[in-house]
Amino acid sequence: MAEEYPVSDRNAQVSNNRSGGSSLVDILETVLDKGVVIAGDIKINIAEVELLTIKIRLLVASVDRAEEMGIDWWRHDPHYSSQAMEVVQENKALHERVRQLEEKQNTSSEAEIEKTDTDEK
């Protein structure tokens, strides 16, 4: 069974944890504020022939800190942002429109060339 402490003893323990040493919250706050980078490579070789290389890069930081460092992929990745998905769809529509306009331009240019050829004869 868990020991029960009077309320005053529990408050004393909580204040001791906060004042003495680093609590998990303090460590997490520091990590998110400063950021931590973990990097590693996994290589699989057989008979000195490299078959597979996996590069692992991990950054742990707050969103604000990441943005300060110029990292904001979640804003532009369609898997994480509905706005990014709208941009992707708009981009596809624009590419299709440009393709149609180019085809129309090419068709009218070819018609003009044929007309010029017929007029010259």
Image (cartoon, helix red, strand yellow):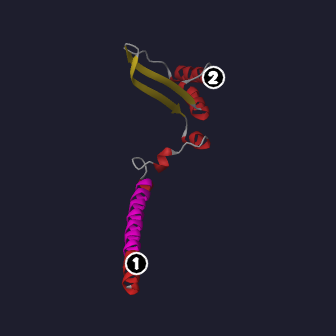
* Residue type marked 2: Ser
Quadrant in the rendering for residue 61: top right
- Position of residue 98 in the picture relative to residue 64 (left or right): left
Task: Provide residue 106's location: percent of width, then percent of height.
Answer: 39, 71
Quadrant in the rendering for residue 82: bottom left
Q: Is residue 3 magenta?
A: no
> How far apart in space, not on screen, are marks 1 and 2 (Cα)?
86 Å
* Residue type marked 1: Ile
Question: Toward the viewer: 12 or 108?
Answer: 108
Q: Are marks 1 and 2 in contact (CB under 8 Å)?
A: no
Question: Toward the viewer: 41 or 9?
Answer: 41
Q: Is residue 100 above or below residue 26?
A: below
Pointer 1 residue = 113
- The residue at the point 49 percent across, 23 percent down is 40
Q: Which residues are magenta?
A: 84-108
Between marks 1 and 2 in the image, the one whose residue lies nearer the viewer: 1
Question: Toward the viewer: 96 or 83?
Answer: 96
Q: Is residue 4 above or below residue 62?
A: above
The answer to which of marks 1 and 2 sits earlier in the sequence is: 2
Question: Toward the viewer: 106 or 89?
Answer: 106
Q: Report the magenta stretch's main SS.
A: helix
The quarter of the image holding the N terminus is top left
- The residue at the point 51 percent across, 24 percent down is 7
Q: What label sits on residue 19 in the rendered view? A: 2
Task: Provide residue 55's location: percent of width, then percent of height.
Answer: 46, 27
